Image (spheres, helix red, strand yellow):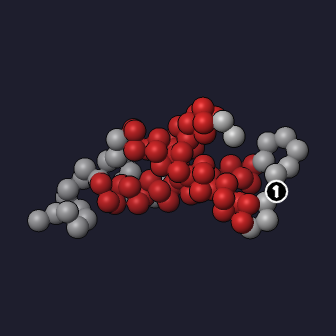
Amino acid sequence: MEIIGVIVAGIIIGLLGKLVAPGDKDNIPIWLTILCGIGGVIVGWFVYTAFGGNGSDGVDWVRWIVAIVCSAVLVVIASTVTGRNRKSGFLHH
């Protein structure tokens, strides 16, 4: 897979992951959302392959759904760890 394809897919998957992630996830910057998307694409495809996914003719929707879920998990983790919302979480003093 080309690096440009991964970046473009990461942008889209990151935004979709942010959309479906539970909780307040608007407190992370867009560049971190994109990194979560790229990570979601890469990790999601490894998970998909590990569970026996081998692609299908045309668009493989299952692989993309796994990538979105992985991205959503990464967005939630990033939001929890680096979130700007100081009124909740472990960063509040």
Q: Position of residue 15 (x, y in %)?
A: 51, 41
Question: Could you tell me the amino acid type at mark 1?
Answer: Asn
Q: Residue at x 74, y 54 (%)?
A: 62
Q: Residue at x 25, y 65 (%)?
A: 89
* Residue underneath mark 1: 54
Residue in the foreground of this view, choosing between 34 and 2: 2
Question: Does residue 90 appear in this view?
Answer: yes
Image mark count: 1
Q: Residue at x 72, y 66 (%)?
A: 50
User: Dot 1: what SS?
Assistant: loop
Q: Position of residue 55 (x, y in %)?
A: 82, 51
Single out the residue that lies furthest toward the left. Answer: 93
Residue 73 vertical placement versus 15 (above, below): below
Question: Does residue 9 appear in this view?
Answer: no
Q: Is residue 43 left or right of residue 28?
A: right
Q: Position of residue 76 (x, y in %)?
A: 42, 58
**The N terminus lies in quadrant:** top right
Residue 9 vertical placement versus 61 (above, below): above
Q: Position of residue 40 (x, y in %)?
A: 56, 52
**The C terminus lies in quadrant:** bottom left
Q: Is residue 25 left or right of residue 86?
A: right
Single out the residue that lies furthest toward the right. Answer: 57
Q: Residue at x 60, y 49 (%)?
A: 41
Quadrant in the rendering for residue 33 = top left
Q: Is residue 78 left or right of residue 12?
A: left
Q: Is residue 82 left or right of residue 53?
A: left
